Image (tube, rainbow, N blue to C red):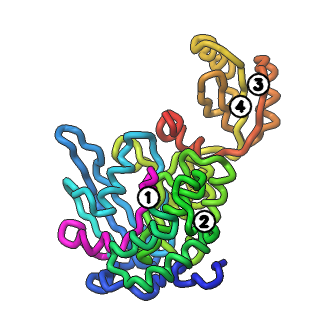
Amino acid sequence: MRPQGSARVVSADLTSPSPQASLCPAASGESGLPTLVKARGLRKRYGDVEAVRGLDLQIHRGELFGFLGPNGAGKSTTMRMIASVSPRSGGDLQVLGMDPDTHGAQIRAGLGVCPQEDSLDEELSVQENLIVYGRYFGLPRAQVRRRAAELLEFVALTDKATSKIDALSGGMKRRLTVARALINDPQLLILDEPTTGLDPQARHLLWNQLYRLKHSGVTQLLTTHYMDEAEQLCDRLVVIDGGVIVAQGSPQELMARHTTREVVEARFGVAPPEQMAHFAAALDGVVDRIEVLPERILLYTDDADHTVGLVQARLTPDTVLVRRSTLEDVFLHLTGRTLVD
């Protein structure tokens, strides 16, 4: 689905490489699709601390690729290396078919970046924020005005074109930041936790824009703290912990590989850790995998009704909830903690 009058902006014309890409065309990956990002043994060291420890990954043209991991896992460091603003300490890295060490400026010209924090100019209007940013890429004035109008239509901000930034809601600011990142028709759109701090309605509105971009062929690299966001949007993703990749695949593949079909949550109200340990011991053997969290115990099962019966025969929880497994259960299994720890 494309907004009328903005096909070029949304599709990013990925079948026609930019002048930068034509200098060093991206190689094809195992999927047969062109590979826009290829890392082999990628490392980043800050003094005695090795933040990224030998990552191998490929991001193919037209997919939405996700990075998941706790704070300090190495996600943002990896993004900065891919964005060609932080040099790598070791390994090989190709972005848009070029080496960031030698073609950093050309790579950056082909990227769109939506940072975690809004960096909009509050002295300018909504439309002026796009026009001024587009001029940084050397776009002709008439062209950048057309593109700004198309992008404002795409992110549903046309009626706010002359408004100042402080008149926008948080969701509007994020949509404008995404529009600004698209002003140069990038080959790769980098999104660093784009929906953090937004209310559910604003998050879903932005998801819709990212979903439309994905299905029109725009390649996207996303970091997020929201499991439902990654599950809804990502074609493939990697889970990073301690600077290494601990799992990778599609959301469906990861859930099939690392968790069960259903989860039974036994909740015990306000219970101290020693009491939770006692409850967990009482449930030993009910299922193969149990996770003990503050005030609740997760039991992973393919037969929730049977598991609920066994739990209630041994304990009297405050409540018992049955739900399907999610990516957060995968993350908990792989790292031993929740994503926001």
Residue under label 2, please give it.
160
The answer to whether residue 112 is above or below residue 5 is above
Q: Is residue 107 magenta?
A: yes
Front-most of 18 and 122? 122
Give the crowd class for mark 4: few <14, some 14-19, many >=20 residues within 10 Å.
Answer: many
Q: Secondary structure at mark 3?
A: helix
Image vertical order of residue 311 relative to residue 322, above or below: above
Kindly identify the residue that appears in the image at 51 percent across and 37 percent down: 340
Looking at the rendered structure, the kind of residue marked 3 is: Val
Q: Residue at x 33, y 62 (%)?
A: 83
Check if residue 35 falls in the magenta segment. no
Q: Mark 4 or mark 2, which has the lower sequence index?
A: 2
- Of pointers 4 and 1, the one earlier in the residue sequence: 1
Q: Which residues are magenta?
A: 97-122
Residue occupying image coordinates x 30% and y 48% = 52
Tag 1: residue type? Glu
Q: How many badges with numbers are in the image?
A: 4
Mark 3 Cα within 10 Å, few/some/many (few <14, many 20+)? some
Please give the residue where the numbered disc 3 appears in the rendered image.
Answer: 311
Q: Nearer the viewer, residue 13 or 56?
A: 13
Image spot of residue 299 (x, y percent)? 67, 32
Q: Position of residue 124 (x, y in %)?
A: 45, 62
224 displayed left or right of 231: left
Q: CA distance from mark 4 to mark 2?
A: 45 Å
Q: Mark 1 and mark 3: span between their CA atoms?
A: 60 Å
Q: Tell me which label, 1 or 2, sits earlier in the chain.
A: 1
Residue beneath disc 1: 123
